[in-house]
Amino acid sequence: MSVLVVGSVAYDSVVTPSGNRQDSLGGSATFFSVASSYFTDVSVVAVVGDDFKSKDIDFMKKHGVDVSGLEVCQGGKTFRWSGVYSEDVNTRETLETQLNVFADFSPKIHCEQKRTPFLFLANIDPDLQFSVLSQMDERPQLVALDSMNYWIEGKNCSLNKVIESVDLLFVDEGEARAIAGEFNLIRCAEHIMRLGPQTIVIKRGEHGVLVFHGSVIFSAPGFPLTNPLDPTGAGDSFAGGFIGYLSASGDLSLNGFRRAAVIGSVMGSFAVESFGLDRIGSLTVADIDARFRAFTELSQFQPLDERESLLN
Ligand code: AMP
């Protein structure tokens, strides 16, 4: 099976306690597509300016990402985002968002892409997300959505319309609270489920993720790292691993979602280990398998048998 993603393809400038990077390749669709390319076929729908470097297109192609839906807008400038991270890299502040070519972008989905079974609406203007969803010939098997405060605050009505139409929502803690107007994360998930999506994945940075799937809650830890360098793109890489695995396995059962959450955590943990896409873009199958095994080790324990008790 395969995945279609609409989102940002960007140049990012970040300041973290470990250093700075100016104008490095980033964007929600870029991190997502590279992370998911290890598992499945993935096509990107996005726009860049004529300042976009051909080596960056080659990098995506090298990962087998289908870039036929990546428009190059002559005379325009690529989307740019800059942010600064706290000392413990757990929180960040956006310094600047320049939409540039995304301000007037109108995505057009090719005929062959209109029947893609998995659709990921990565972080971008919710009107663009909705336009992609409504161009699909038939409802994909799974439609997942990500967003961020910039759109939750700036385009709330449009975002709500998209939330109502999707099966799965990825959000971080702050975004979940902003959407639901609640503090408790269980209540946030219940609130969002009433809007439409039946699976809510709440990302909690180094504290891992909570997956709310119907009435079940599943928790996956964050991978303990000695030297987290740059968390930019960790959420999108998480989503890339998660959706990439679901697409490859076709397993949309509860167990499929549990495994997807751990694979997402594997890919998110790699993203944090370097600036930009350096690490997530240079993995081997052995690296991914080894980290998945390490996750199993990290969170495995002896369960109680049905008739067993801890106290006798
Ligand atoms: P993440 O760290 O996974 O939440 O995503 C970071 C990526 O999102 C960066 O590479 C940015 O280029 C991109 N980004 C930041 N702000 C926005 C926005 N308002 N719309 C779309 N993409 C954005």
Image (cartoon, grey):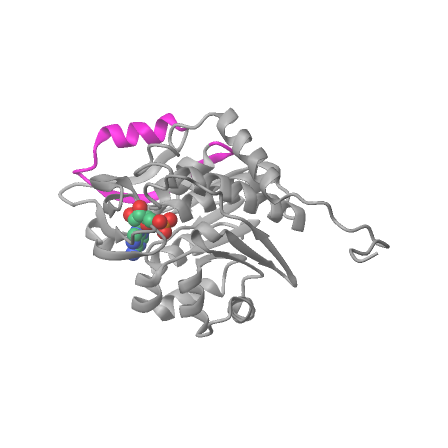
**In terms of depth relative to the viewer, which is nearer, 307 or 83?**
307
Which residue is rendered at x = 24% and y = 52% of the image? 83
97 to the left or right of 185: left
| Quadrant assignment for the N terminus | top right
Q: Residue furthest right?
A: 307
Question: Is 102 located above or below residue 72 in the figure?
Answer: below
- Residue 100, x across and y down, in percent: 19, 51
Query: Residue at coordinates 16% horizontally, 38% vertically from top-left?
Result: 51
Q: Quadrant of the C terminus?
A: bottom right
Residue 276: where, in percent of width, then height? Answer: 30, 38
Residue pushed farthest front? Answer: 312
Q: Is residue 125 magenta?
A: no
Q: Was residue 46 drawn as part of the magenta stretch in this picture?
A: yes
Place of residue 179 in the rendered image (x, y in percent of width and height, measured from the top left) = 42, 69
Residue 35 x, y percent position in the rendering:
43, 37
Q: How many marks?
A: 0
Can residue 29 be seen at all in this image of the molecule? Answer: yes
Given residues 186 and 306, the one toward you in this image is 306
Residue 66 appears left or right of 23: right
Q: Give, as a single range, the part of the protein colored magenta.
A: 38-63
Query: Looking at this view, is 214 or 186 the one in front?
Result: 186
**Depth check: 301 or 43 in front?**
301
Residue at 17 percent across and 38 percent down: it is 50
Q: Is residue 113 visible?
A: no
Quarter of the image for residue 19 reads top left
| The residue positioned farthest toward the left in the image shown | 75
